[in-house]
Amino acid sequence: MYKSFFKLQSNPFGTSPDPRFLYMMPHTREALACLEYGISARKGFTVLTGEVGTGKTTLLRRALSSFSNRRVSTAFVFNPRLEVLDFLEFVLTDFGLIPATRTKSGMLLQLNRWLIERFRMEETCVVVVDEAQNLSWELLEEIRLLTNLETSSEKLLQIVLSGQPELEEKLRHPSVRQLRQRVSLWCRTQALTENQTYAYVTERLRIAGASWQLFSPEALQLIHRCSRGIPRIINLLCEHSLSLAYVEQVQQVTAAIVESVAAELELETQPFMVSSAALGNGSSSPRSATEDNFMADFSRETPGRQER
């Protein structure tokens, strides 16, 4: 709607996880390198965690797209609330296989034979499970057992579990200690700092073809404060702000426009809440210095805030 008005070639703040718009910050580069290494080096299990909206799915898609010139087959499970048989059927189908039978033993044998063929062709096979914190205990165990599909020296299947911080807490449970011991690499996404938020918005606009500064410095400052540095909320604020600027026929988003959008989205009265796992309420989940600073800023900036 506003693209022609702002002379943009594409939508800079779409809701889809478009790898083209992935902005490389230090923690993003580290997580991406971790994912790419885990897959290419056939490490077996890799875990990616981060708060809601911090770009995990975008990062996964970017990592997988980096193997476009290599022989990599991928099954992307975006709904983990599946029974074991449904999960195996989904994986086979996403790999391009038609399940010969709908028994667990039959599908595992079919998968194993196919993985051996891919291995002989020097192809890497990856199963990515998104929102993995929602996996049942039974399915987690079945996924662990998939790593038993191996040769004497290599894992035939690479598995990436991606989820919210609750996934780390879940993987600490004694019942899945065998799975946790098999995790070779841990990757994490984080909220953005104020400077990173400015750079993030500017880079997305540049990629979309912006030829002038569409957001005032005051508007960007308010976007960071309202979003708490969460990329998904930054996108939401920027998208609505550009739409409102178009309606008002102004060529730069002001702080007043952002304030109006934030109020409409209830971001002032309902700021983004960090999950209980990230807060460390009764858990031993590790937090980075960035997360600690983020929580300290959150407490300072919202004195006396009451839950609605």
Image (cartoon, grey):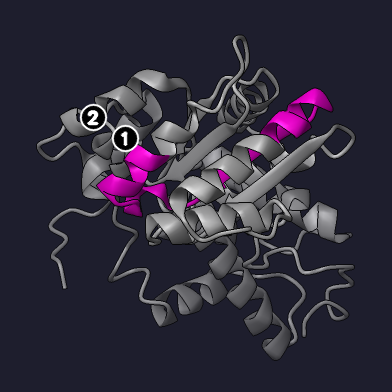
Q: What range is drawn magenta here?
A: 115-142
- Looking at the rendered structure, the secondary structure element under dot 1 is helix
Q: Nearer the viewer, residue 258 or 183?
A: 183
**Looking at the picture, how far across and down is residue 222, in whole percent?**
49, 59
Q: Does residue 291 appear left or right of residue 108 in this picture?
A: left
| Residue 298 is one of the magenta-drawn residues | no
Q: Does residue 10 appear left or right of residue 85 in this picture?
A: right
Q: Nearer the viewer, residue 59 or 134?
A: 134
Q: Which mark is residue 172?
A: 2
Q: Does residue 213 appear left or right of residue 142 in this picture?
A: right
Q: Amino acid at mark 2?
A: Arg
**Looking at the picture, how far across and down is residue 126, in whole percent?**
64, 38
**Looking at the picture, how far across and down is residue 226, in whole percent?**
42, 60
Mark 2 vs 1: CB contact within 8 A:
yes
For disc 1, the marked residue is: 168
Residue found farthest to the top: 153
Q: Residues within 10 Å of mark 1 (few under 14, many from 20)?
A: many
Image quadrant of residue 80? bottom left
Residue found farthest to the bottom: 247
**Looking at the picture, how far across and down is residue 206, in whole percent?**
82, 53
Q: Amino acid at mark 1?
A: Glu
- Looking at the rendered structure, the secondary structure element under dot 2 is loop
Q: Residues within 10 Å of mark 2 (few under 14, many from 20)?
A: some
Whole-angstrom CA distance, mark 2 to mark 1, is 7 Å
